[in-house]
Image (tube, grey):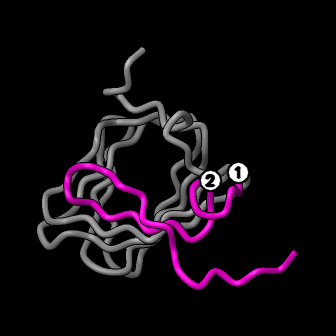
Amino acid sequence: MVRIITEPQRVPVPGGKIIDEFVGRVSTGTDGVSVARMKAPAGWDEPAQTPEFDEVTLVLAGSLTVEHDGTSTEVAAGQAILTPAGQTVRYVAGASGAEYIAVCVPAFGPDLAHRADDPI
């Protein structure tokens, strides 16, 4: 069934980051893909994760540093990065923060992210 999504669902997270999910487990009950707009303040970071999903991150404004494989990749506005499932990554917002779109296949779920600070 075709449906228009007139507004995203706000997903509460700590640390000042805003997640507005348009398609995904929270907003539409979709588990095959998620699409969310993120806004992270300057210096925001999150624990390393080894997700069970591929993620495409398209930076709209500011920049992100993506740490992986003992190195890091700077992603500027207008650029995207693909991080495959099973790859340990960590995201850090640049000096002016970051606004970006995240597309995850299958859809993002906290239980699929496997963050370093998750209880075992």
Q: Quadrant of residue 100?
A: bottom left
Question: What is the number of the mark on residue 44?
Answer: none
Query: Callout 1, which amino acid?
Result: Asp
Relative to residue 79, is residue 69 depicted above or below? Answer: above
The quadrant the N terminus occupies is bottom right
Q: Give the image location of residue 15, x and y in percent.
A: 20, 51
**The residue positioned farthest toward the top in the image shown:** 120
- Left or right of 23 on screen, residue 61: left
Does the stretch in magenta take in 43?
A: no
Q: Quadrant of residue 44?
A: bottom left
Separation of marks 1 and 2 at Cα, in angstroms = 6 Å
- The reply to whether residue 80 is visible in this rendering is no
Residue sitting at x 25%, y 64%: 40
- Left or right of 68 on screen, residue 93: left
Residue sitting at x 37%, y 26%: 118
The quadrant the C terminus occupies is top left
Residue sitting at x 34%, y 36%: 48
Task: Answer with mark 1 or mark 2, whichever residue precedes in sequence.
Answer: 2
What crowding class fits label 2: few (fewer than 14 Cα within 10 Å), some (14-19), or many (20 or more)? Answer: some
Q: Give the image location of residue 25, x and y in percent.
A: 62, 53
Question: What is the number of the mark on residue 31?
Answer: 1
The chief SS type of the magenta part is: loop
Q: Give the image location of residue 69, x and y in percent.
A: 38, 36
Relative to residue 72, is residue 114 depicted above or below? Answer: above
In this rendered view, identify the residue nearer to me: 99 or 25.
25
Q: Secondary structure at mark 1?
A: loop
Residue sitting at x 57%, y 63%: 103
Q: Which residue is mark 2?
A: 25
Q: Quadrant of residue 65?
A: bottom left
Does the CB distance between marks 1 and 2 fall below 8 Å? yes
The residues colored magenta run 1-30
Relative to residue 69, is residue 73 depicted above or below? Answer: below
